[in-house]
Amino acid sequence: MSPESNKPGGCAAARSAQVKEEPAQRAGDTEQSALAHSRLARWLQRSANAVGGGLFLTLFVVFIIQIGARFGFNRPLPWTDEAAVILYIWVILWAAAFVVPRREHVVFDLVWNSVGPKTRQVMAVTGNVLVGGLALVGLPATWDYVHFMQREGTPVLEIPLMWVYLPLVLLMAALVVRSAWAIWQAAQGIGLDSELRP
């Protein structure tokens, strides 16, 4: 038993100090959790950007090979046409799903900028429920169709068409997740700025 606990107010003072420490400890835990979440989000975004950059670089290299073979050696390579089209599909859909920030997509902000925060909150939740809900409803049918296309291949490289159109499924899934996240943020009052800026 410590000497302080023998004193008349010792126990009460110790309890009071413990009660003050607990909220601070909980706040520290929340801060660490937010920091870990932020690090994970940054790592995921960097990884998505790296994949998108790699796809675009590969498309550029295929395009250069195609031009060199066609105009430099007068020997067109059929596989380069096909690879360029496949890579183009992947670049566009991957970027739309994971690379381009939500605020950089096409938006109509005339009404948004003319209303107050509460109306913006309702607009944000409603819009994301519509987009995310439609993507969620369409996701199984999209996967069924893309999976069905596995039986057919591309004419030259003979890549199953499932792998050509797989990023469409990823885009639909990303729309669901991003819409759910945007709804949660809108409910918390986050991102309801006076202007739609990145």
Image: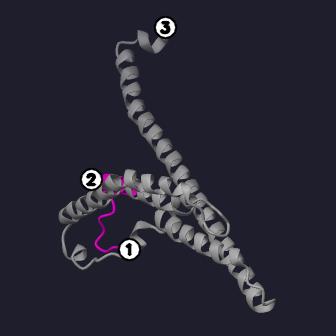
Q: Is residue 186 magenta?
A: yes
Crowding around mark 2 (Cα neighbors within 10 Å: few <14, some 14 to 19, many 20+) is: some
Q: Amino acid at mark 3?
A: Met
Of residue 75 and residue 54, the one placed in the foreground of this image is 75
Residue 153 shown left or right of residue 196 in the figure: right
Q: Which mark is residue 187?
A: 2
Crowding around mark 3 (Cα neighbors within 10 Å: few <14, some 14 to 19, many 20+) is: few
Q: Count of labels shown?
A: 3
Disc 3 marks which residue?
Answer: 1
Front: mark 3 or 1:
1
Residue 46 sits in quarter: bottom right
Q: Residue at x 29, y 55 (%)?
A: 133
Residue 110 sits in quarter: bottom left
153 relative to 30, above or below: below
Of residue 137 and residue 162, the one placed in the foreground of this image is 162
Of residue 88 and residue 4, the one placed in the foreground of this image is 88
Front: mark 3 or 2:
2
